[in-house]
Amino acid sequence: MNKLLVITGGTKGIGRALVEKFASVGFDIITCSRSAKDLKQLNKEIVSSYKTVKLLTYKADLSKKEETLAFASFIKEQKKSIEVLINNTGTYLPGQIHKEKEGALEQMINTNLYSAYHLSRALIGNMIKKKHGYIFNICSTASITPYVNGGSYCISKYALYGMTKVLREEMKEYNIKVTAVLPGATKTSSWDGVDLPESRFIKPEDVAESIFSVYSLSKNTVVEEILIRPQLGDII
């Protein structure tokens, strides 16, 4: 029986690369997106490429608590233990705290922090019961480095990083591993329109490979955080 990966935001960027990676090694996958069109395309491509893998998709806006919990209920209805949970959903709005648009903080806290908080709480019970499982939270170098144009994005990612560290401590006694992933500038749609060569960006596939490598370590070992930057350094 295939192991199960649950990942939010699996249709693009790092999320898509992770879906590809885990599908390639025989994981069944449950993912979500706000776009039904993107989910349909993902399903078509994954199912055609990986014949032994089952992919389930769910349309949800995880900036809304009720839709996050509905996604969690959909996952629970499948009656299958979660091997890996990756909280990947996120959004980025550039700006400075003193002059960014009204509501930017709330939007990014809801998407970048609360989605991971509510989904983890909803799904972790079965992991605790079985004393087995792995949680990766996709944070950012903005979780540890303040950027002038980062504003509320940095606030939300600092908070997610803090939540991840607390959850790591809480889950030790239950044998559940928790890892914070802190990628720098990664070539995703967030950087569309930026006039920089691809060589200045991390490849999403490299982030996915790093996460899978860490997951693959023995049960005795956990990598508490993965910090990844472009070879030439951060883009500021």
Image (spheres, rainbow, N blue to C red):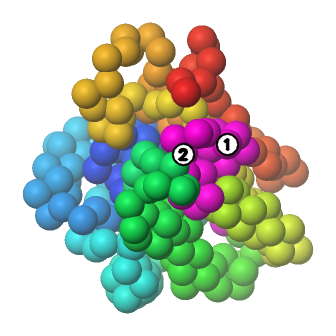
Q: Residue at x 44, y 56 (%)?
A: 100
State the residue position of label 1: 146
- Residue 155 is situated, as x and y percent measured from the top left of the image, at 62, 58
Task: For mark 1, give the secondary structure.
Answer: loop
Quarter of the image where one finds residue 67: bottom left
The residue indicated by pointer 2 is 150
Residue 152 is one of the magenta-drawn residues = yes
Q: Nearer the viewer, residue 180 or 48?
A: 180
Q: Residue 220 at what x, y percent from top left?
A: 87, 51
Circles 2 and 1 in contact, beta carbons < 8 Å = yes
Task: Report the amino acid beneath label 1.
Answer: Pro
For disc 2, the neighbor class at 10 Å (few under 14, some 14 to 19, many from 20) is many
* Residue segment shown in magenta: 133-157
Q: Quadrant of residue 58?
A: bottom left
User: Which corner quadrant holds the C terminus?
Assistant: top right
Total labels: the figure holds 2
